[in-house]
Image: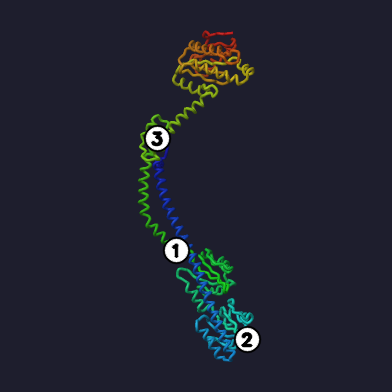
Amino acid sequence: MPSPFRIRIDLRRLILLLAMLSAMVMLANGFHAAYRVQRDLLVEGTLDANEAYAAKIAATTDNYLRQAQRQLAYGAAAVAAASRAGNAGQVATEVERLHQQADFFNTVSFVDARGTVRSVSPAGLSLRGQRLDSKGAVEALEKRTPLISEPYTSALGNLVVVMSHPVETDEGRYLGYVAGTLYLRQQNVLTQLLEDHYYRDGSYVYVVDRARHLLAHPDPLRVGTRVDRNAVVDRVLGGGSGQQRLVNSRGVDMLAGYAYLPTTGWGIVAQRPTAMTLDRLDSLMLDVLRRSVWPAVITLVLVWLAARLISAPLGRLARIAREMDAPEAFGRIEGVRSWYFEAAQLKRALLTGIGLLQLRIGRLRQDAQTDPMTGLLNRRGLEFEVDTWLALGREFSLAVVDIDHFKQVNDRYGHDAGDRVIVRVARLMRELSREGDVVCRLGGEEFLMLFPGMSAEEALHAAERVREAVAVADMELGVPVTVSVGIAVWPRDGKDFEQVLKAADRALYRAKEAGRNRVLAASGEPAVDRVDA
């Protein structure tokens, strides 16, 4: 017994469900697609902005360093002139001017050819008269060219970058160098330039040198530390410029733009956490979702109403389709009002389908119950007819017909000739039978004829007509072909059909023993016995 709580899914409900589900899926897909598009736009926009930012800062920093180098070159020329004139005061004045004029450097000094500091600004530094052996000082004395040093820790414990320019006379005599020092952990033009690009939205800029050390970073404690496991640092120190999304050395998902600074070999990186970039998107999409609820509800209601209207003819056609084998199905389908193209097409297809189905069922039934060689009924067709007659209580006689000496026909003339004989005999039996009689082929050369409502005597005469027609028929063999027939009557000769059939077989056997080409009845009626030699 089916459960009373089982939901019945019919065509109308299914169409409505699919329509509503489709609308909801499209809405969700549209929302998701909008979210993905906006997210990708934000990510791409942030990457483009950071790349442009990094390139701009690199260009500005490069310009700053070039100006600083020009200032040092000008100051070196002035110091050379003052030194040649032996005017130590003028040297100190020029060093002070370099320090104060543009505020490029935290300190400016003049170091002679032996590495001794001759003048320094600000004057409060206790470096005058000291001999420098720091990395930057040694490099400047050895190379005697304009230099920007790698970052190192100075004698005073500061993390510094030294820019230097040689001081030479007009005759080319080397007098020392003028050096401008940048304290990376203190304020100067470079640190101010980089810090101006730190924003509250999480964006910030940092600078790395060739050795992967941080020269500038919003977190002062990280300045001077080494950066490892960072794909962007790998790329920018390789001379590249571009953009990339990555997880940095501290496990934070970042959107980074980077630019290479060829003057110093440094890398400039501008980046922003991905989560901060997308944070506003989440709130915006939630607001969009809230605003879309009522329009979505209204849309779904309209879709539901429209789907219900559209499904009405389809629902009727579906209900009728379950009873396509009913005689009135054709008329019921024609009565469906198919007011739109698809329903009309479905209606037409169902009508065509019913016709084809009935035709095919008829053909299948005929194929299943018909002997393919002769077109007569086979055993299955015989069983169907007999079952019907037995259920109706209809009396009938039957005749078992067998072609005499058929094996000799096959052996002497071949199986093709034998097949032609079988077909010819079958045609004669069909031509001599009444409407309502049943003629079937039991197999091989054996046939069966059913005569509804015939007595044994009438069946004997009907079978005799068949025997005579076969005996005189031209079988294209040059010799006549005959048949023997056994007659029985249901229910006189048995309680069931099998018994009656066996009685007819026994009569046929007796006809064969009596010399063939004759008709004998099962219950001893006078036989029609004709032998035309």
Mark with earlier residue (2, 1): 2
Please say if 225 is above or below 306: below
User: In which quadrant is the C terminus drawn?
Assistant: top right
Q: Position of residue 113 (x, y in %)?
A: 63, 85
Going by the numbered disc 2, the residue's amino acid type is Glu
Few, some or many residues within 10 Å of mark 1 (<14, 14–19, 20+): few
Please say if 252 is above or below 115: above
Q: In this image, 293 relative to 265: left or right? A: left
The residue wearing badge 3 is 320
Q: In this image, 125 relative to 293: left or right? A: right
Give the CA separation, mark 2 to mark 3: 114 Å
The residue wearing badge 1 is 279
Is residue 137 at least partly visible in the picture? yes
Q: Nearer the viewer, residue 174 or 235?
A: 174
Going by the numbered disc 3, the residue's amino acid type is Ile
What is the total number of numbered labels drawn onto the structure image? 3
* Helix, strand or loop for disc 1: helix
Q: Farthest residue toward the front?
A: 171
Q: Position of residue 430 (x, y in %)?
A: 50, 18
Mark with earlier residue (2, 3): 2
- Locate residue 87: give its quadrant: bottom right
The residue wearing badge 2 is 171
Q: In this image, 62 relative to 27: left or right? A: right
Mark with earlier residue (3, 1): 1
